[in-house]
Amino acid sequence: MRLDRFLSNLDEFNRLDARLLLAAGRVRVDGQTVTDGRSEVREFNRIELDDRLLQLGKPARYFMLYKPAGWVSATEHPEHPTVLDLLDEPDKHELHLGGRLDLTTTGLLLITNDGLWSRRLTQPERKQPKVYYVETEQPIGAEYAETFAQGLYFAFEDLTTLPAQLEILDTRAARLTLHEGRYHQVKRMFGHFRNKVVRLHRESVGPLKLDPEMQPGDYRSLTAEEVAHF
């Protein structure tokens, strides 16, 4: 929200009041005087008028979680434990997921209370690469890589998937890089060849890779540098 709108939304101020307060240098955001009403402020900013606190602000929180199989990617669920149950953090109800993984899929999941950051993370136009380790029931042929690179037509959505890169690691194991996140996309892509996915693990999202020392259920806060990637 623009700072001038934030001020004019308060009961005691109108738009003219907001402009005058800003012009007089009476408004501070995170300790810095701000005179431009077009400046964007969020729920994480501390906003002060003279010595009066208008908004306390709250810390933005960002986590990397190693999702185990059997935990659902949701904030609440009637049948299964959720990934938020794995976090020993206060005010967990304020957190949400930056993307999802299927119930049986393991690997990197990002969790935050910053809606703008998670939207940037998941926007299709940003085409953040997501890398998966895949094991299948039947052997994986070279034609898979050719087909995935061309894109597959999904009739339900009436779309063709973006080109994806497949690296065959073994007879029934591969590493797949996607640049989008369609419903059950990996399983549907291998299903095109009638080959069932028996293990699916997300290794990375964009430049963020799951820490090799982490075990299923482990999590940690992201560094400021990692947050700034998105």
Image (cartoon, helix red, strand yellow):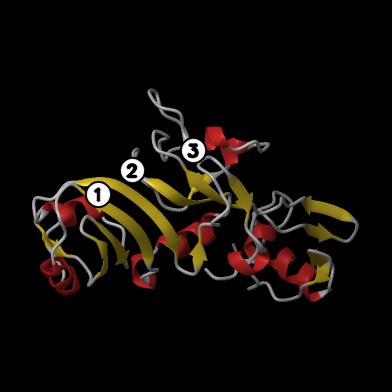
Q: Position of residue 149 (x, y in %)?
A: 19, 73
Q: Is residue 80 left or right of residue 207?
A: left
Mark 3, residue position: 83
Vertical arrangement, residue 20 with respect to residue 97, above or below: below
- Find out whether the residues at labels 2 and 1 contact each other: C-beta distance under 8 Å: yes
Q: Secondary structure at mark 3?
A: helix
210 and 58: which is toward the camera: 210
The amino acid type found where label 3 is placed reads Val
Q: Secondary structure at mark 1?
A: loop
Q: Secondary structure at mark 2?
A: loop
The amino acid type found where label 2 is placed reads Asp
Q: Residues within 10 Å of mark 2 (few under 14, many from 20)?
A: some
Q: Quadrant of residue 225?
A: bottom right
Residue lying furthest front in this view? 171
Residue 144 got which mark?
none
Q: CA distance from mark 3 to mark 1?
A: 18 Å
Q: Is residue 147 left or right of residue 75?
A: left
Mark 2, residue position: 102
- Find out whether the residues at labels 3 and 1 contact each other: C-beta distance under 8 Å: no
Q: Is residue 126 left or right of residue 117?
A: left
Vertical arrangement, residue 45 with respect to residue 149, above or below: above
Q: CA distance from mark 3 to mark 2?
A: 11 Å
Decide which of tag 3 and tag 2 comes sooner along the chain.
Answer: 3
Mark 1, residue position: 184
